[in-house]
Image (spheres, rainbow, N blue to C red):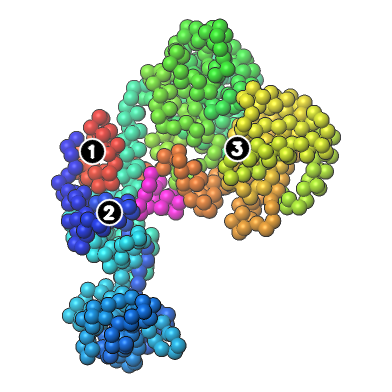
Amino acid sequence: MTGRPEVLFPLFGALTKLDGVGPKTVQILEGAGITKPRDLLFTLPLSGVDRHRRGSIREVVAPAVATVAVTIGEHYPPNPPKSRGRPYRVNVSDEQTAFQLVYFHVRGDYLQKLLPTGQKRVVSGKIEVFDSIAQMVHPDHVVTLDEAEEIPAFEPVYALHAGISQKLMYRATQAALAMTTPLPEWIDPALKSREKWPDWQAALARAHRPKSPTDLSPHDPARHRLAYDELLAHQLTLALARSVQRRAKGIKSQATGQLSAKVLAALPYMPTSAQTRAIAEICADLGSEFRMNRLLQGDVGSGKTLVALMALLAVVEAGGQGVMMAPTEILARQHLDGLQPLAATAGIRLEILTGRDKGQARAQKLASLENGDISILVGTHAVFQKDIVFNDLRLAIIDEQHRFGVSQRMELGAKGGFTDVLVMTATPIPRSLALAQYGDLDVSVLDEKPAGRSPVQTALVSTARMDEVVEKLQHAVTEGRQAYWVCPLVEESEIVDMTAAQERFKQLRARLGEGVVGLVHGQMPPAEKDAAMARFVAGETKVLVATTVIEVGVNVPNASIMVIERAESFGLAQLHQLRGRVGRGAAASTCLLLYQAPLSETGKRRLEILRETEDGFKISEEDLAMRGAGDVIGTAQSGLPRFRIADIERQSDLMAIAQSDARALINTDPKLETTRGKAARTLLWLMEQDKAIRLISVG
């Protein structure tokens, strides 16, 4: 693909080409992430100041901004004061009244020139009343009557970096606007007319030259359009990545249904319609000649494991192998426990491979894998190691995707030349974030709970009632019930978390007796952690004191009580995950959120949302509204794009439109060669989507 279109050259040139921008200002702007005129254009004003001309300051109620023509009176004192802190005053009068302009730390000769006694000037600034005298301290604008047009009637206000004035930002932005030219239209014409969006150049001009506060709203057609441009460029990149992946030939794995029929017949329940739908979508992908890239998103306890097994059986039926990966050994072993009996029912060999496999045992597993005796492998990321060779790997399933980066997805795909990839997550992701983060994947959602899962009663209890809680726990344990006790999250420090957990463990052991209470935390050696978990799973210990290591995936059907200490210190999604550890068996389950009073407004709101609903998707939307995108998926590995104008928390509907529009365009014009396709290339260059541009040239 040819380089950047010539029409965009000025916008990617030096900032020093802009009016009033010298080398010093460039340094300051670069500190704010503005390195070229294009960046200025995409830094929209945050608010505005009404500066339309008035006859007198009496037309506003102080404190307020006023713009009036005045006659300059005498300066007081006539010479600037020697002591720095003393004010310098200039008496002025408008059509109806007199007031004072006040300056601090200024040279008198400068002000004599700026405000010559007896002449007229237009001043604009904030009017305040001090000792019953109206004052304007350091006016924002002082101009002659001829220059009065320079003051915008509604002046945009930008977020500033130290050392940059509003005046300079305004001038530089207006100069950048003057560099723009009309660009070919990349938006679908029907969509553009339905939304009443202006052209690109007009939208920018309107966004930087607002006429009133309503022009600053994200719903204003100009701003709405600019946000859409950003989202469309992002979704085009993902759609191109998806089409390149989809054009990557896969191996057709046609399921016969023989093995899955045996497993379904042995199950004590029927799959939910959501499970059936997801299995059908996955099997259709496996049976096509293109590579599958699908995300299976299911709430806590929605039955992802069964869907995963059906997918694995489909490739085994077709003569291939499958691998299922979990982020930790505990989870890998749990998948093994859940899948092994079902695999046995189907009559196939399923094995686990973790970092713990050593020597002869490991060598035997590797040989069985290479000759195809092992049909399904369960493991941690240890299956990435170079010496692990499959006979015919057709499907890789990655559990808890947010712990695996995109590069690891690729690496795994490379293990089998044409491996289909299914990514699973039990963390319900709000729709807008799923679109932003996984737009290159197709998505299947499990939004129903399988039969037999009891609802969890959630209650809020103050830590002041701790003794009462421990007493109730003692009573429950004597009845044969099991409980988790999750310790507070302390300043992200595993060492402090560990100490808190050890203290709580000792206290509960003293109350409930030796051998009744177990302990797991992040600092334990893996073997000890696994042993403690195994004792709890086997029912030998009744209460498991833990840090958040049990957040994801641990499955103990008999555990029916979850106590979360200092619940206000956890995020909503995390609390929802923790609560999902109970309610897996037939017993009525309880989740106690212990909080320390007084609760902040947001802390209270978070805990109340949990009490009100068990719907993970609803909870995740609330979490997003309360915390923002970066926090919800953890900014460090979120892979979330940084948008300058679009707001993915509040414009998820726009993101969805952008995704379907981008996919439709790439489906009909994969190399972006039509008129609209070429316009879309310009958009990609404008939005610096270099990755997409490389994909076109590859494709």
Question: Split into 4 quadrants, where in the image is the N terminus?
Answer: top left
Q: Quadrant of the C terminus?
A: top left
Residue 630 - label: none
The amino acid at mark 2 is: Gln
User: Which residue is at 29% across, 36% downward?
Assistant: 691
Residue 576 vs residue 23, the one in the foreground? 23
**Vertical arrangement, residue 282 with respect to residue 120, above or below:** above
Identified at 40% across, 24% down, the residue is: 411
* Quadrant in the picture for residue 351: top right
Q: Which residue is mark 3?
A: 494
Measured along the vertical axis of the image, is residue 595 above or below residue 427? Answer: below
Badge 3 local density, few (<14 within 10 Å), some, or many (20+)? some
Q: Please report whichever mark, 1 or 3, sits nearer to the chain's N-terminal start.
A: 3
Task: Residue at 32% x, 88% y: name it.
Answer: 76
CB under 8 Å between discs 1 and 2: no
Reply above or below: 383 against 456.
Answer: above
Q: Is residue 527 left or right of residue 219?
A: right
Q: Which mark is residue 672?
A: 1
Mark 1–mark 2 Cα distance, whole angstroms, equals 38 Å
In the rendering, at what x and y percent does residue 428 appear?
53, 41
Gap between marks 2 and 3, in whole Å? 40 Å
Q: In this picture, which residue range is highlighted in magenta?
A: 641-657
Whether 436 is among the magenta residues is no
Classify 10 Å Cα crowding around label 1: few (below 14), some (14-19), many (20 and above). some
The image position of residue 248, as x and y in percent, is 33, 25
